[in-house]
Amino acid sequence: MAIELTDPQREDLRALARRATARARDVLRARIVLAAADGMANTTIAGRLGVHVDTVRTWRRRFVQHGPAGLADRPRSDRPCRYGPAARLKVVATVTGQVPQPDSQWTHRGPCQDRDVLRSVEVTTVLVLPSSSHNLHWRGRLELSLDCFICQRTGRTTTFVVGADRAVCSGDDKFDQHYSAGRIAAFDHREERDQTSLRAVVDYWWAPFHDAKRNEPGVALTRAPWVRLHLGYYCPKTEKPGEFHTQTNLVRPSSGSCRHCSAPVMVSQEVPQLRLLVGR
Ligand SMILES: [Zn+2]
Ligand SMILES: [Zn+2]
């Protein structure tokens, strides 16, 4: 790939290469292009400038393809993304406007690099089932406290439903309840004779922000994470359904009994565990 420079381009590159305040890497790129334009081979340039020949190839190709603009730094994919108002608006628009498709869109594509945006929390808990059989079962719904970057408040109750493409944030007195980008990615439960266990994974979009009311920064999993899990049961004696919830902030062990026949239905011995799987 031969490089032909216009006179102004050559002047600019020479000026850059001489400029005392220029960054070393900009000077290097300019010198590579100037040498290439003089008809020098890549290996010769590499030897003269003391760099790897791949570096010479890269900047020669960039200049041929993009001209002087090709010598600028490209945004690096591993650079942490800064979430300015524009990025935030884009997320809000996606959340409230187009419903993101699970998997295909928002879980793998974000305004910057997906890994910067996506957070994953694992919720696990085990409930002991007393002998009375009330067919206790998990409801595909949970509430999780999250620091919401859309309404920019910490500790918002966010409701997730299995199969829904978005979650609902409780907002606050100024900022109404609103959709947020989150979903239940996994909801696996295992029923054994005397216990039932649940493992749910919740994915959500998250970006740094500052809660002006509480004067504290938002964190990826809120400071005092809290979850509420829902269960249903069926009373065999009265043939009526009932429901329960279990949550993090209860004194353990906590138990629940049937509202129809008062038989014990479940005992929660340990607090549900919350663990951030992805993101910091
Ligand atoms: Zn919110
Ligand atoms: Zn009952």
Image (tube, rainbow, N blue to C red):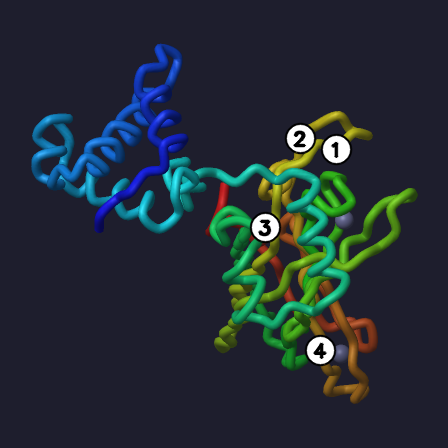
In the picture of the structure, the residue carrying the numbered disc 4 is 233
* Mark closer to the chain start, 2 or 4: 2
Circles 2 and 1: CB atoms closer than 8 Å: yes
Check the image and report above or below for 61 versus 16: below
Mark 2, Cα crowd under 10 Å, few <14 / some 14-19 / many 20+, is: some
Q: CA distance from mark 2 to mark 3?
A: 26 Å
1 or 3: mark nearer the eye: 1
Cα separation, mark 1 vs mark 3, equals: 28 Å
Of the image marks 3 and 4, the number of the one nearer the N terminus: 4
Left-right relation of 212 to 1: right
* Residue type marked 3: Val
Q: Which mark is residue 217?
A: 2
**Callout 1–callout 4 Cβ contact below 8 Å:** no
* Residue 212, position as x, y percentages in the image: 78, 29
Q: Earlier in the sequence, mark 1 or mark 4?
A: 1
Of mark 2 and mark 1, the one earlier in the sequence is 1
